[in-house]
Every structure is written in C-alpha cells, then in structure tokens.
Amino acid sequence: MSNSLKHIYHKIQKIAETASTNAKIELLKEFMPADPVFRKVLYGTYSEHIVFGINKFPPIKKAASLQGVLSRLTGEEDILALLKQFSLQPGVSMADKDRLFKAASVDPETYKLTEMMCKKDLCCGISAITINKAYPDFVRITPYQRCSTEKDIGNISFDPYALAQCKANGVFAYYHVRDKKFISRSGSMFRQMKHLISKISERPKKMHFGNKFGINNAPLLHDRDDILIGELLVLDGLHNVYDRKTGNGIITSCIYGTADPNMVKHICFVVWDCITREEYKQMYSPIAYQTRFFNATQYVHAVSDTNVLRTIESEPVYTIEEAKAFYRKMRAQGEEGAIIKNLKGVWKSNTSKDYIKMKNVIECDLMITGCTPHKKDPKMMGSIQLTSVDGKIKVSCGSGFTEQERLLDWNLYIGRIVAVEAEGLIRDKSKSTYSLYTPTFIEVRHDKKIANTYKEVLDIERSTNRGSRKRG
C-alpha cells in the first residue's frame, strides 16, 4: 500500500470548490460513510480536544531531505498513527517532527493535507458543526457560554437584585467531578492537575444542593455527576494571584504536560457555576443561575480551603449604579472588570443576554500573520502582525512582550490566536482596513482557534464607557 493521502486531499479540494454549505454537507454525506481514512482526517482536524503540537512545516523539499531515523512506512494509516501518537504525548520532539515531515513528503498533496491537519483547518469551508450535520455527533463540540456586552445591559433585571461578579484573569476550565479531570474551553485536558484534584476530592460525602423545588441533601461522591465551571489561577507564596501572563502561561503549559511541577501545586480553581453532565451534553440547563451558583458554592464550602477552591467574588446589586460601582471596585483591585448576571438566567452554549460583561478597554482575539525583527537587536522580535478573521482589522503589535517572549521564534506562532488590549478601533483614511489604537499583547490564546471579526470588535468598543476614539 502507498503512504500517500493524495486521494483524501482531492476530496477536500472538491469540497473547497463547492460554493454552498448545503452542497458541502451532501459531499460529506457521500465521502464519510465510504471512506474510514477520510473520517479519521476530519476527526483529527476538527476535534477541539486533539492537539498535535506542530504549527510550522518546512518546505517540502527540505522536509524530504531531513535526516533522522525512520522505518519504512507501509500503509495509509501510518501518518495518522504518528499524529495520534503526538496528540497523546506531553510534547513533540524535533525527531518526532522529522519523522512526520519525511513521511508526509511522499507527494505534495499528502504534505499539504498533513500540514492543514496540524493547523486544525482543512481550508475547505467546513467546521465541526457542518460535519455533525452530515454525520450526527461525529465530532465532539465543547460547549461554552459567552457573556453579552454592555449594549444589552437593559436586559438585566434588578428585581429583586442582580448578581455582580469579578471578571477574573485566569484560564477558563470545566471540572468534571466524577471523572476527576479539568477540561479547557477548547476541549483539551489539563494533564498536570493531580495535586489540585486530590485536594478537591477530599471533601465530605454529603452537602446541601439546590434544585428548582428548593434545597435538599444529596450524596455527592457517587450519585452526583456535576461539572463545575470557573477559572484556574496560580497563587504565589503569599496566596495572592499571579499576574495574568505569568499565571496563564503556567496553566496552559499543563495542557501539554510541560509545566513546572512545583508551580502546578499552587494552582487554584475559582468557580461561578455548576451544571450536570447531562446538561453539559445537551449544551443547555434550564435551572436558574441563583440555584446553579448556590450548588457551586457548596463544593467550595465542603473543600474549605481557598488555596484549592474559591467562589468568584460576588455582590448583590440593586441598580445599574451599584453595578457600575462594583465594576469600578474590581478595576481598582487590578481585575479585568465585572460580569452582571440575572438570577433567573439559564445556561446555554451561546452568547447570553442574561450575563453582561463590563470592561474599560477593548480586548480582542486576533490571528498572527507575521513578525518583524527588533530594530536594535535583529535576534529579537520587534512586533507581530495581526488580523481579524475577516481581514478587516490589520495591526502591528510591539508592546506588552517580555524580553524572554521577544527571544522566541514567532514565525512558529503564525496562524495562532493572541489576545490584545487596545484603546479603540481606528481607521487610516488612505486604507480600507481598520487598526487598533495602542495595542498591547496579553497572551497567546491556546484555548481559541478563531479570531474575532471586525463587527465583534466594534461591538466590544461600543459597549465601553469611553466610546470610540477617532483618529485618521
């Protein structure tokens, strides 16, 4: 058998050349049942929880000439087997990469297909949702509830009150209580959480829980199958929270199993929601937020160790003025902002107008398209070039980086998503695209695969207290 995946590449190209989404779905219905290799390519590419750890491919001629130990590959499955191996191990060595590059160099089509798989996009206009429409429940989609912006603040009810909560600066995570595992927003598992999980698991077997009928007693360890929702933070020696960049860098390293074991022991989980596994699967919970939040607090009370498990800082607010006062308090504490929540709000995998985000600056997620060297030291990165997913925002960002970050090879990060802060959108009169005023790098978003659109960034700007800053 040939090691070539050329025939899969041609099927992907046929989908790419097909204009309508419905027609793409029909092609998927035709290809998927009959071709198990095609299914494996789709599953590996569009499953959020699968990470291969390779973002940059050398030119195919260079890849074909790479030196390294490589046994003769004898079947179509071998490239996919290598990728599966990489997804299960903590990191990918240069020797691993050389094996894959050489194996994929059998022909240009196979090489390009392998590269697209590693970058998690087959560039043919399909997504996990599209695939599941053709082949139901084929790709696992991790649910995620987003908050609306301040333009929807009028949807918040202060009768009798709303709940104001700190907008934390950590890494979003789900904790599956029964399975004893932490899962990221993109579905990846945090690998180095044994210390934290053991501490959480040392809780009493019984606690008070709420439901739509009131409060009851329920066994916890064996009969409940809850999922806690919150953010992972890292504490220093004085039990204070590390700055966002440092802490989030440690936490995201846990996804790849490369975090410092000593620092991992200082990770804390801050919770604000609690749903059941069935609700997680259905991507919807009809239970009112006040009940879900109460259930989350019961885990915190049971563990009774704020260095392990904390409830997000919260206050009841009776007016919009009180909500703004809480927001200002959070900003004074160095936090990102506040979330204002309706007590009766449901949980759903979508943007909800029952939960409103209040922030003072624009924060958006853009894709890296290139980098330029530092003017004073060519060995260091000077700035990175960023774009929105629709190409309407293009900006160069050279602020917010540490010296260590500037020494990284940012060409390896091309195609990745980063979070940046800015004071607003601007537009050069001589160009048709927009830019950002005073952009500052925050972090690489390991949990996101798609950048914001121009409209999303514009909505974020309009929701700020400051409004747009006009320059041109």
Image (tube, rainbow, N blue to C red):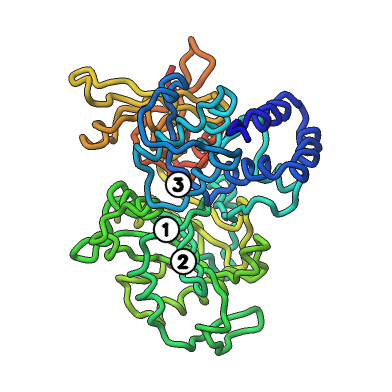
The numbered mark, 2 or 1, whose residue comes first in the sequence reads 2
- Disc 3: which residue: 86
Label 2 – label 1 distance at C-alpha? 8 Å
Label 2 – label 3 distance at C-alpha? 20 Å
The numbered mark, 2 or 3, whose residue comes first in the sequence reads 3
Identified at 62% across, 80% down, the residue is: 211
Mark whose residue sits in front, 1 or 3:
3
Side of 385 where 392 appears, left or right: right
- Disc 2: which residue: 181
Residue 271 in percent (x, y) is at 44, 66
The answer to whether any part of residue 321 appears in the image is: no
Alpha-carbon neighbours of circle 1 within 10 Å: few (<14), some, or many (≥20)? some
Q: Which three-letter amino acid code belongs to the residue tagged 3? A: Phe
| Labelled pair 2, 1 in contact (Cβ < 8 Å) | yes
- Disc 1: which residue: 190
Identified at 46% across, 53% down, the residue is: 88
Mark whose residue sits in front, 2 or 3:
3
Q: Which residue lies most toward the top here?
A: 430
Identified at 55% across, 27% down, the residue is: 112
Residue toward you, 279 or 423:
279
The numbered mark, 1 or 3, whose residue comes first in the sequence reads 3
Instruction: Classify 49 as above or below 395.
Output: below
